[in-house]
Amino acid sequence: MNAERLNHYRRTLEAQLADLVSATREHEEQIDGSRTTEDFTGPDRASDLESLEVDASVTASERKLAAKIRHALERIDLGTYGLCEACGAAIPEARLEAKPSVSLCLHCQEAHEAA
């Protein structure tokens, strides 16, 4: 992959990471500002607890995606970005455009999910 394409993916990943860090920070502040589970009483208790659980789940997902993005940025620095980490084949640009943080080609991703 040429330097221009790598720079394109670096900028894309860095922008995604910045947005994600900001969103995660907001979700964490909401969770930290939430009441404890003992504070939830009354008819809305189940709804309030579910909302707290959803916020925690979203935050965990955001952290996982941020780790994948950081890993992709490291792979750019190492010169291995765009190569499947399982088989070493080139990951098609269409797949990278759709999800720049991927580290597996479609075949290896499907095999990983089936396992």
Image (spheres, rainbow, N blue to C red):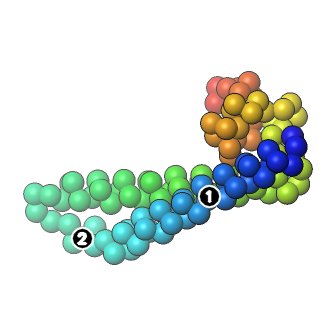
Residue at the spot 48% in from the left edge and 69% down from the top edge? 25
At numbered mark 1, what does the secondary structure look like: helix, strand or loop? helix
Which quadrant of the structure image shows residue 102?
Answer: top right
- Horizontally, residue 104 falls left or right of residue 30, namely right
Name the residue nearer the viewer: 27 or 113.
27
Disc 2 designates what residue? Answer: 38
Name the residue nearer the viewer: 66 or 113.
66
Can residue 74 be seen? yes
Name the residue nearer the viewer: 81 or 60.
81
Say whether disc 1 or disc 2 marks the residue closer to the N-terminus.
1
Q: Point out residue 7 in the picture as x, y percentages from the top left corner.
A: 78, 52
Amino acid under disc 1: Ala
Which corner quadrant holds the C terminus?
top right
Disc 1 designates what residue? Answer: 15
Residue at the spot 18% in from the left edge and 59% down from the top edge? 45
How packed mark 1 is, by other alpha carbons closer than 10 Å (few <14, some 14-19, many 20 or more), is: few
